[in-house]
Image (cartoon, rainbow, N blue to C red):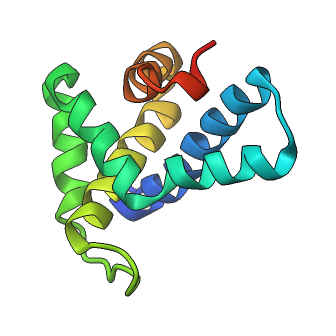
Amino acid sequence: MADINSLELAYLGDTLYDLYVRERLVRRGGHVKTLHRKAVSRVCAAAQSRALTRLEPLLTPDEADVVRRARNAHQTPPKNADPADYHRATSLEALLGWLYLTGQRDRLHVLLDAALGDDPDLAL
C-alpha cells in the first residue's frame, strides 16, 4: 500500500462511496431523477465532511492515520467547495479506498453504515 498515495486512495474511495449511496437509494426505490438528486446531495464535499465527523470516534489508530495523511495531501479544491470540507471529504474517500484495497470489506461496510445510518432515505 506504500506505493499508492492518498489521492489515489481517495479516487477509488469516491467511487465506493457513490456506489454505496446509490445502491441504498435504489433499494428504497423511486424515480431516477429523484434518486439522482438525493445521491448528489449525499456525495458532495459538505455531506462527506459531516459523514467523517460521525466516523472519527470509531476509527482505529491506523484508520485515523490514513485520514490524517489524506487531509494533509496537497490538493486544490474546486471553487464551489469549502476547502476544509473538501479536504475532509478527500480524507473519508481515502479511508474507504484504503479499507477496500487492504481487503477489510467488513470494516468498510461497518463504517459506511455508520456514516449514512441515520439518513432515512438510505435506511434499509
Question: Along the horizontal axis of the image, is 16 left or right of 111?
Answer: right
**Which residue is more in the foreground, 76 or 36?**
36
62 or 79, nearer to the observer: 79
Comparing 49 with 35, the one in front is 35
Which residue does the image show at 51% across and 36% down from the upper left?
101
Residue 5 visible in the shown view: no
Q: Decide if residue 39 is on the left or right side of residue 107.
A: right
Residue 10 drawn at (x, y percent): 44, 55
* Location of residue 90 by image quarter: bottom left
Can you tell which quarter of the image residue 74 is in? bottom left
Q: How far across and down, in percent of the image, does residue 116 sit?
A: 45, 28
The residue closer to the viewer here, 61 or 84, is 84
Q: Is residue 76 above or below residue 106?
A: below
Q: In this view, does 104 lie above or below 85?
A: above
Using the rendered image of the protein, determine whether residue 70 is visible from the camera's viewpoint.
Answer: yes
Q: Which residue lies furthest to the right in this view?
A: 31
**On-image quarter of the N terminus:** top left
Tell me the quarter of the picture where residue 77 sits.
bottom left
Q: Which residue is drawn at 27% across and 62% down?
A: 85
Please name the residue shown 67% across and 53% down the image: 37
- Image point (16%, 50%), residue name: 68
Give the number of callouts.
0
Residue 21: x, y in percent? 61, 36
Q: Where is residue 64 in the image (x, y as percent from the top left)?
A: 17, 36
The quarter of the picture where the C terminus appears is top right
Name the side, left or right, on which 122 lies relative to 50. Answer: right
Left or right of 20? Residue 110 is left
